[in-house]
Image: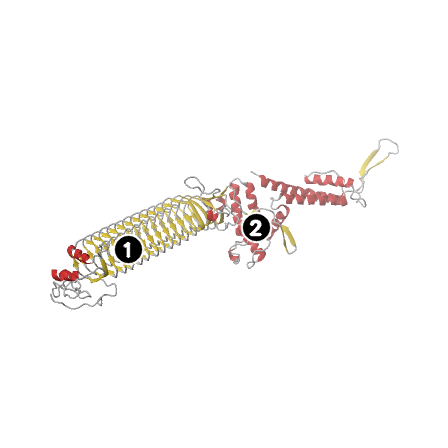
């Protein structure tokens, strides 16, 4: 057979990743081809690349020419066999020609098999590809094996079609590798394969089981848009750098148990139709699952996430299993939908855990959960009864919707329930002891150790408090303004409120000391603003400013604070806690006394007097102090002006008839004389004390008094019993049951 032309080197080698034309029968390839059996305007014939020094491809050479060509090959030779059709005898002869005598295995230099066809089984096991290896668009009709093969340079299998089983078990890829768009009709075996550089399976289709167990990906691994119709097994695989599974569809079971992801990994938009197992997987970099869908079980039990984790918008239709999962960075579950059971038992978040606008449609076992940062449930929706056990620095439940009963057992947390929607009773309880594990031993609270384990509620604004139960929580910074039905709020255990400032304070020339009582945070904020002005920092008087102290329009007015005190007072009274309601009555009266808009001046004057004399009937010591002062004043005035100088003597006067007989006398009493000296003697003190004590109980002493003393006694018989009554009232309000 005549020679067609000499092919020098690889001048016709394509530079890009060109793919076959959709109609290869009519589209000629971009390399010198055989054209055997061509029919004009119908077919280009054989597309096999011309063999050097021959005008035909290897498949169409006669036996002599083929033997001549193969006999000239040596192990490590370069090959250009693009478009060639291989039967099993031809492939066997080619491999035998390249077999290294020292190892007994084929050894290739640069190998070009683009668009080639292998009609039977193809066995490249243990082969060595020393140069570029290209199998783009190759069609393997039978089983193919590259088990143990070694690819020293780049290798391309893009658009390859594997009709039988494809074996790459323990194959080694030292260069960039591309399986983009490859089709695996049956089992694909990559167990133990090593990819030293970047690897791409973008758009690949796996109709059978895809085995990547113990595979090692040292470079970037791309599986974007791939489809796994059968099971996908990545158990024990290692991804040293970034791994991309965006848009992948897993129709069978997807196993990533004990996988190690050393770089960022993305499963954004992935679809898991079967079970997905990531148990004990380790994510050292960021992990993104945003928009993924899990139609069955999503198992992340004991998985470890070292970087930021994103499950935003993920839909969990089956069980979402995050038991004992560790999140070292921020974990985002924003807008995630838990249609199935969500299990977060003993999950640990070393950063924030963000569940904004997430939805829990089935019973959730949310806890015990440990979070060193913030657990944000703002806007989340709980459609079913739920129990949340959380140990965290902060828990945000702003605008959270509870469509059924809820129990929140918290530790260490500062909780915000502003504008939460409670359709059923919700109980918030401070859990006093550490949450226990399944074995009954206390859980590890290391990241929070040393902090106050109590619970602080900072806001229930906009909440329908008729369904809210608070137990053993700190309400010293809680904002109640804007809440509904506060009079039906139920407080259990030991709920603490803010206290008044301690010590003696002075404002201008006025020196005062606040009496101890429970107050609302709103009163603190109002008094701080009133004392310092909105632009001042809190420094004196001890009243704390609020978060909106620079904007006075956002600080509640005394009228609003008084209404809040009134409702809370009723809640205590309805709970048969009259002494507990006393401080809230005091706060209500204080705000009415300072309210210059809705309280008339006359009423404010009465409130000032009521406050000054007895602390609104709640300060027994104040009323007794005034009583003592009044009695002392009465005593001094009586000794000085009320008692006469001497006791009035009786005088008898009458007329003796001239003729004798019965004599009639009139007994009179001399008018008392005002004292002029020796007013403060022991005798006068005893008399004045008797008058004063009798005045307290509305009794007349019968003591002779001067005119001034009479008026002094009258005044004391009005004032002192009132003060005594106020003192008795104050004591009653503190001990009433």
Q: Nearer the viewer, residue 226 or 490?
A: 226
On-image quarter of the N terminus: bottom left
Q: Residues within 10 Å of mark 1 (few under 14, many from 20)?
A: many
Residue 140 in the image, given as x and y percentages of width and height:
19, 55
Q: Callout 1: helix, strand or loop?
A: strand
**Residue 592, numbered circle:** 2
Q: Can you tell which quarter of the image residue 653 is in?
A: top right
**Residue 331, numbered circle:** none
**Residue 172, numbered circle:** 1
Q: Can you tell which quarter of the image residue 9 is in?
A: bottom left
On-image quarter of the C terminus: top right
Residue 62 visible in the snapshot? no
Residue 298 in the image, given as x and y percentages of width and height:
33, 48
Q: Nearer the viewer, residue 737 or 96?
A: 96
Q: Nearer the viewer, residue 374 or 186?
A: 186
Q: Is residue 219 above or below residue 470?
A: below
Q: In screen coordinates, is 140 left or right of 233? A: left
């Amino acid at each position: 057979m005549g020679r067609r032309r000499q092919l020098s080197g690889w001048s016709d080698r394509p530079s890009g990743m060109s793919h076959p034309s959709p109609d290869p029968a009519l589209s000629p390839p971009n390399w010198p081809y055989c054209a055997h059996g061509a029919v004009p305007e119908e077919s280009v014939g054989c597309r096999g690349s011309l063999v050097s020094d021959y005008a035909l491809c290897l498949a169409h050479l006669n036996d002599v020419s083929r033997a001549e060509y193969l006999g000239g090959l040596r192990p490590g030779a370069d090959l250009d066999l693009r478009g060639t059709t291989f039967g099993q005898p031809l492939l066997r002869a080619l491999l035998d020609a390249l077999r290294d005598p020292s190892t007994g295995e084929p050894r290739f230099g640069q190998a070009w098999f683009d668009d080639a066809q292998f009609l039977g089984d193809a066995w490249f096991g243990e082969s060595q590809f020393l140069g570029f290896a290209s199998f783009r668009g190759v069609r393997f009709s039978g089983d193919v094996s590259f088990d143990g093969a070694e690819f020293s340079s780049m290798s391309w299998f893009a658009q390859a079609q594997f009709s039988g089983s494809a074996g790459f078990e323990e194959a080694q890829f030292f260069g960039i590798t591309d399986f983009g768009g490859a089709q695996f009709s049956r089992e694909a075996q990559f167990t133990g394969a090593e990819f030293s550089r970047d690897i791409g399976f973008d758009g690949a289709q796996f109709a059978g089981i895809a085995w990547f167990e113990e595979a090692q990906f040292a470079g970037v691994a791309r599986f974007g848009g791939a489809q796994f119709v059968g099971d996908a097994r990545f158990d024990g695989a290692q991804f040293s750098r970034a791994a991309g599974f965006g848009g992948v569809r897993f129709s069978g079971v997807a196993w990533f148990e004990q996988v190690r992801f050393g770089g960022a990994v993305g499963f954004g938009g992935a679809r898991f139709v079967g079970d997905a197992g990531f148990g004990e997987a380790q994510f050292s970099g960021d992990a993104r699952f945003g928009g993924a869908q899990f139609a069955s079980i999503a198992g992340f039990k004991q998985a470890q996430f070292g970087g930021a984790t994103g499950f935003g918008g993920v839909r969990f239709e089956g069980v979402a299993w995050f038991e004992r999962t560790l999140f070292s960075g921020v974990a985002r579950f924003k807008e995630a939908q838990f249609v199935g059971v969500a299990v977060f038992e003993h999950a640990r978040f070393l950063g924030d855990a963000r569940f904004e606008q997430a939805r829990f449609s089935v019973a959730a076992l949310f806890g015990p959960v440990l979070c060193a940062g913030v657990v944000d449930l703002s806007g989340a929706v709980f459609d079913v009864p739920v129990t949340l056990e959380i140990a965290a620095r902060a828990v945000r439940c702003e605008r959270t919707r509870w469509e059924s009963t809820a129990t929140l057992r918290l530790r260490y947390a500062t909780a915000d329930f502003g504008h939460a929607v409670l359709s059923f009773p919700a109980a918030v309880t401070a859990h006093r002891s550490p949450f226990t594990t399944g074995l009954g031993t206390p859980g590890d609270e290391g990241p929070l150790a040393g902090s106050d384990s109590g619970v602080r509620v900072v806001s229930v604004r906009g909440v329908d408090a008729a369904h809210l139960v608070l137990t053993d929580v700190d309400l010293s910074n809680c904002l109640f303004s804007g809440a509904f039905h506060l009079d039906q709020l139920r407080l259990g255990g030991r709920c603490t409120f803010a206290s008044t400032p301690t010590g003696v304070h002075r404002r201008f020339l006025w020196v005062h000391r606040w009496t101890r009582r429970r107050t609302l945070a709103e009163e603190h904020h109002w008094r701080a603003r009133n004392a310092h002005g909105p632009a001042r920092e809190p420094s004196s008087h001890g009243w704390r400013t609020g978060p909106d102290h620079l904007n006075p329009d956002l600080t509640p007015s005394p009228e609003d604070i008084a209404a809040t005190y009134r409702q809370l007072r009723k809640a205590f009274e309805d709970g048969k806690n009259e002494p507990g309601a006393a401080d809230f009555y005091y706060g209500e009266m204080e705000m009415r006394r300072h309210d210059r808009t809705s309280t008339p001046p006359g009423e404010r004057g009465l409130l000032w007097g009521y406050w000054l004399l007895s602390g609104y009937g709640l300060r027994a010591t104040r009323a007794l102090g005034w009583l003592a002062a009044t009695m002392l004043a009465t005593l001094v005035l009586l000794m000085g002006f009320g008692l006469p100088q001497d006791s009035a003597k009786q005088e008898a006067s009458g007329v003796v008839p001239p003729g004798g007989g019965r004599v009639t006398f009139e007994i009179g009493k001399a008018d008392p004389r005002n004292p002029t000296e020796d007013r403060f003697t022991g005798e006068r003190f005893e008399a004045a004390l008797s008058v004063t004590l009798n005045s307290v109980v509305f009794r007349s002493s019968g003591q002779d008094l001067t005119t001034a003393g009479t008026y002094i006694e009258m005044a004391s018989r009005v004032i002192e019993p009132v003060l005594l009554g106020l003192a008795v009232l104050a004591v009653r309000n503190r001990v009433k049951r």
